[in-house]
Image: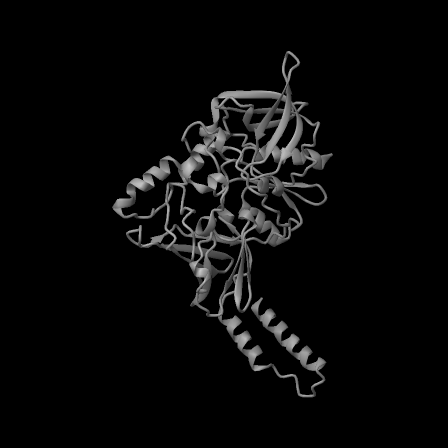
Amino acid sequence: MVRHAISLAAAAGALLLVASQAHSHHAFAAEFDATQPVHFNAVVKRMQWTNPHAWIFVDVTLDDGTVEEWAIEAGTPVVLFRRGFTRESLAPGTEIVIDGYRAKDGSRRANGRDLMLADGRTLFLRDPNANAP
Amino acid sequence: MLQSNAGTCLVVACALIALSGCEQPAQPTQNTVEVAQAMDTHPDLSGRWVVGGRRGGGNSIMVIEPNGTEVEFPTFGDYQDALAAGTVSPAARIVGRRPNYRHGNNVYAERDGGMTQRYYASPPLYKPEYWDQVRYLDVNGNVEDMTFICLPAGVPRMGPPIRIVQTESDVVLLYQHRNTWRVVPTDGRDHDPINSQDQTFLGDAVGNWDGDTLVIDTIGLNDLTWLGWPGWFHTNEMRVEERFTRTGDTLSYEVTIHDPDVLMEPWVMDPVELELDRGQGVYVEDPPCIDFDSSHMVTRERG
């Protein structure tokens, strides 16, 4: 249980590491809109372990009951692996809360910023002094 | 460590003589002596190396011991000190590194990351007729920079190795980037006449010792890779000179780019200092790269 929680914390922390690699991939601003934050209660469908970013595919149930699939961009796989992230960390069916920024092209994609468990615990290692907007 | 290797050679030589049934006294062969002398003359670069090391990132890191105890260190250097002092287990796993992005979010992370890609004390000086090309490539990097569509960064953009294994006749360089490896001969041979005409991401490399500095000379590179984020292209006539100098537990990595077709003068990249990593963590695979973003980019903004 402890290991599970830590892995999730690591995963969420790594969401913030998009630009930490020597050769970061795309530019955030070309693909995602900082003025369109999204907030989802979602259920994990699957993970995609690829470079330059891992992706979390989730189901989001809208107020009218409609279910939409969204793709959430996460950190670099190697960073996630190094932090103890395993295939168990976000197993299919895990309920999570995602905060991120929506894709500019209107597709159901978002750049993940925070990842939380459904019980409200914030699971990332952010600098407590950071003043996030 | 080198003494130990040389000793191993002697032991092996003695064992071979014993197995052969030869009754001659177990004297080291001439070859063994030469190997021992050659190895003694050069620093051993073998080890795990980490960029920035003690000063890297400015972030605190958290590790978890095998028994579940969490320990947080203000810097990576403090973690390394604890490893050396035996106060933290080498088997402890790094589970988190605190990001220090502006406002702690991805918006600024990428913008700041893009800006730092331009922080060179001495950028390459292109011939005037190529200034427009560099500018075009920079502005259109989202489609022109081949790393954006998942091609390898190549030499030298992929940076220094994370591990070096040195033998008497070559050095093996291991990179996290795309699980890349290079085996560079250091036996005095010249460039391979055929391989050096290929156009590859890693080129044809040979190593020589300049005093205590290992100098790796690489040619035969393609022109698909860049030297850096701001549109810094190169030709397939480029020659890359990498210099590794070990001083204690630090390794200086200096790169000079020779591409006289487009550069006014050889470009000396900002040196990188690596630090010996005393950790014993398991290396992990760098998964394949799949371009999942290009078709969704709607502007040319980068960073």
Q: Is residue B87 above or below residue A58?
A: below
User: What residue occupies the far top of the structure in this picture?
Assistant: A64
Q: Quadrant of the C terminus of chain B?
A: top left
Q: Of residues B19 and A9, which is closer to you in this image?
A: B19
Q: Of residues B267 and A61, which is closer to you in this image?
A: A61
Counting from the top left corner in percent of width and height, residue A95 is at 68, 25
Q: Is residue B242 above or below residue A83?
A: below
Evaluate whether residue B245 shows in this view: no
Q: Of residues B294 and B270, which is closer to you in this image?
A: B294
**Residue at image coords 64%, 78%:** B13
Counting from the top left corner in percent of width and height, residue A49 is at 61, 38
Residue B240 shown left or right of residue B284 in the figure: left
How are the residues colored? one colour
**Residue at image coords 28%, 52%:** B264
User: What residue occupies the far left of the structure in this picture?
Assistant: B128
Counting from the top left corner in percent of width and height, residue A126 is at 56, 32
Residue B65 shown left or right of residue B157 in the figure: right
Residue B34 shown left or right of residue B128 in the figure: right
Q: Is residue A57 above or below residue B74?
A: above
**Residue at image coords 32%, 38%:** B135
